[in-house]
């Protein structure tokens, strides 16, 4: 580690995503020991805290012309972008580059520079095959990632996925969980709701989901399951916090069920914690997750968690299980929350598990209290100093 002085963090931007937030928090620790440069590929927009010097791969004019979110465009011009990155690395005398997310990881590994290269993998990539670009990226992962000096997986589930489906040597992969700014979450959760939301929450048991309104987050099944919960528990409400292409479709489903007075969809708020902390239960029903940061954040907000066992993240957090060879086949009550099985069938079976999981907690306040207490104790493991020591250990080994 003594020969590492200048570190680059390669990310799309410093806004909007969990990976970008994590990169910003990592930079704040790295600047204690290293010179840190954050190289932004996608946008000049900065929302998250960071430390170090910002470097833009493109001029402002080119940022407007060439959006890295259009990854097909990126691949068509990758040679030019890689050469620009190589030039920046050489000018800044970068000793180590840490990249987050697939496009930055790929161009990091394609640069022919003498720096050490670490890639951070944050999702179960084998489950991402619905888009052509995802399948192309997966080919790159299979053939390129083995050339990294180290791969950092966000969970044991992601590590297992890389080993089993991309044939990457297990010894090359190190699982390191995210940094979390617990003090900031605790501060933000005290913010007041607006008048409309105060009324919505008043004397109600609110179930909350936070996430993009896309097929992979499966909010439609949450709505279906909640409709049955509400029949049995008229005091319950459902709040979905997020934006996305399924907004109108989900709202139509709510209207068709005649539940528009008890189910609300709000645009994503930079402070979801003020809602989560006031809810009875947080529920996650994602098709896939790398880790599911929002589960930890809900624990910080002292809100009980229900999650689908989507095979990466939730079972590690809620049940302390990292063996992904077997799937659960029934609802599992753990010390820190409730897991329910993912299903191959859509609709009734999935909604049934959601309904029963919610009702399990609604009808037992003592159980909820114990879960919240155990979760509060558990999150002490996510000590930022300890996590940073894991990163430094990796630097010594490469």
Image (cartoon, helix red, strand yellow):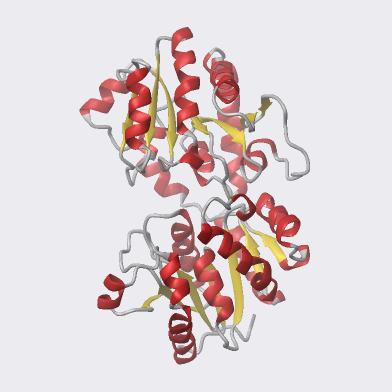
Number of numbered tags placed on the structure image: 0
Q: Locate residue 41, reporting x and y percent.
A: 40, 72
- Residue 288 visible at all: yes
Q: Locate residue 2, reporting x and y percent.
A: 63, 84
Image height of 353 relative to 170, above or below: above
Residues 301 and 210: in front is 210
Asked which quadrant contains residue 238, the reply is: top left
- Residue 31 visible at all: no
Image height of 253 relative to 42, above or below: above
Tell me: 385 left or right of 91: right
Residue for point 44% across, 91% down: 91
Quadrant (top left/top right/bottom left/bottom right) for the N terminus: bottom right
Asked which quadrant contains residue 398, the reply is: bottom right
Q: Locate residue 82, reporting x and y percent.
A: 48, 82
Tell me: 70 left or right of 126: left
Residue for point 39% across, 39% down: 273
């Amino acid at each position: 580690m003594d020969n590492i002085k200048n570190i680059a963090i390669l990310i799309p931007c410093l806004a909007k995503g969990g990976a970008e937030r994590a990169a910003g928090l990592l930079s704040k620790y790295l600047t204690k020991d290293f010179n840190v440069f954050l190289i932004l590929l996608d946008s000049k927009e900065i929302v998250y805290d960071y430390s170090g010097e910002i470097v833009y791969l493109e001029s402002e004019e080119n940022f407007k012309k060439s959006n890295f979110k259009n990854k097909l465009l990126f691949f068509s011009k990758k040679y030019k972008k890689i050469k620009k990155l190589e030039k920046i690395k050489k000018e800044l005398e970068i000793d180590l580059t840490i990249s987050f997310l697939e496009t930055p990881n790929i161009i990091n590994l394609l640069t022919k520079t003498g720096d050490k290269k670490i890639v951070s993998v944050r999702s179960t990539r084998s489950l991402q095959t619905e888009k052509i670009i995802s399948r192309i990226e997966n080919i790159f992962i299979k053939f390129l990632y083995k050339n990294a000096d180290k791969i950092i997986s966000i969970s044991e589930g992601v590590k297992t996925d890389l080993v089993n489906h991309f044939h990457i040597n297990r010894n090359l992969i190190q699982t390191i969980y995210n940094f979390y700014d617990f003090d900031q979450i605790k501060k933000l959760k005290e913010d007041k709701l607006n008048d409309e939301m105060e009324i919505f929450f008043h004397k109600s048991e609110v179930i909350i989901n936070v996430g993009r309104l896309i097929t992979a987050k499966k909010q439609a099944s949450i709505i279906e399951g909640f409709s049955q919960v509400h029949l049995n528990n008229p005091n319950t409400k459902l709040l979905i916090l997020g934006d996305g292409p399924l907004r109108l479709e989900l709202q139509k489903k709510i209207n068709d069920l005649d539940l528009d007075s008890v189910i609300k969809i709000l645009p994503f708020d930079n402070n979801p914690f003020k809602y989560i902390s006031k809810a009875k239960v947080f529920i996650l029903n994602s098709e896939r997750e790398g880790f599911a940061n929002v589960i930890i954040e809900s624990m910080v907000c002292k809100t009980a968690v229900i999650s689908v066992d989507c095979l990466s993240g939730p079972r590690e957090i809620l049940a302390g299980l990292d063996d992904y060879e077997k799937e659960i086949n029934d609802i599992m009550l753990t010390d820190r929350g409730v897991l329910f099985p993912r299903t191959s069938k859509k609709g009734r079976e999935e909604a049934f598990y959601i309904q029963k999981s919610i009702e399990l907690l609604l009808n037992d306040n003592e159980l909820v209290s114990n879960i919240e207490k155990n979760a509060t104790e558990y999150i002490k493991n996510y000590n930022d100093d300890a996590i940073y020591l894991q990163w430094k250990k990796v630097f010594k080994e490469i």
